[in-house]
């Protein structure tokens, strides 16, 4: 049985954000409307780099595919 992982990347904004998370890589997002927060496999914060996104999401999938496992990356936004 395959495992599904959900990653979220919070985009930088000039405005004061209503989204609160680790500035780089974590697993939780809190918002003004949901102060308890939501947990994801990976949360890439506003200060995360493209390299961090690749290391957290892309590289493990590439390695799995090269090991013969099925892999699918769906990006939206």
Image (cartoon, helix red, strand yellow):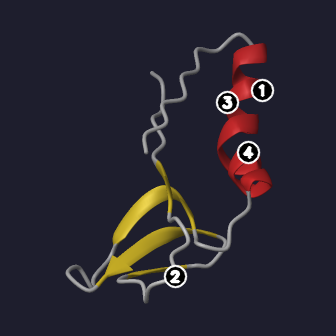
Q: Quadrant of residue 76?
A: top left
Looking at the image, is 30 positioned above or below residue 71? below
Question: Percent from the top left, x then y, of residue 33?
Answer: 20, 81
Gap in angstroms between the C-alphas marked 3 and 2: 32 Å
* Up-down relation of residue 50 to residue 23 (above or below): above
Is the residue under label 2 in contact with that under label 3 (CB below 8 Å)? no
Few, some or many residues within 10 Å of mark 3 (<14, 14–19, 20+): some
The quadrant the C terminus occupies is top left
Could you tell me how far apart the alpha carbons at marks 1 and 2 are, in whole angstroms?
Answer: 36 Å
Q: Nearer the viewer, mark 3 or mark 4?
A: 4
Question: Which numbered disc flags the more N-terminal residue, 3 or 4?
Answer: 4
- Identify residue for label 4: 54
Pointer 1 or 2: first along the chain: 2
The residue beneath circle 3 is 61
Judge left or right: residue 25 versus residue 21: right
Q: Circle 1 sits in a helix, a strand or a loop, which is it?
A: helix
| Residue linked to disc 1 | 63
> Depth-wise, is mark 1 or mark 2 nearer the camera?
2
Q: Residues within 10 Å of mark 2 (few under 14, many from 20)?
A: few
- Residue bearing the label numbered 2: 14
Q: Residue furthest left?
A: 33
- Asked if disc 4 and disc 2 are in contact, CB closer than 8 Å, the reply is no
């Amino acid at each position: 049985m395959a495992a599904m992982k959900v990653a979220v990347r919070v985009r930088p904004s000039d405005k004061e954000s209503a989204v609160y998370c680790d500035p780089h890589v974590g697993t939780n997002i809190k918002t003004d409307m949901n102060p308890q927060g939501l947990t994801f496999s990976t949360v890439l914060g506003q200060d995360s780099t493209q390299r961090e996104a690749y290391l957290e999401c892309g590289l493990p999938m590439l390695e799995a595919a090269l090991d013969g496992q099925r892999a699918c990356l769906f990006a939206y936004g």
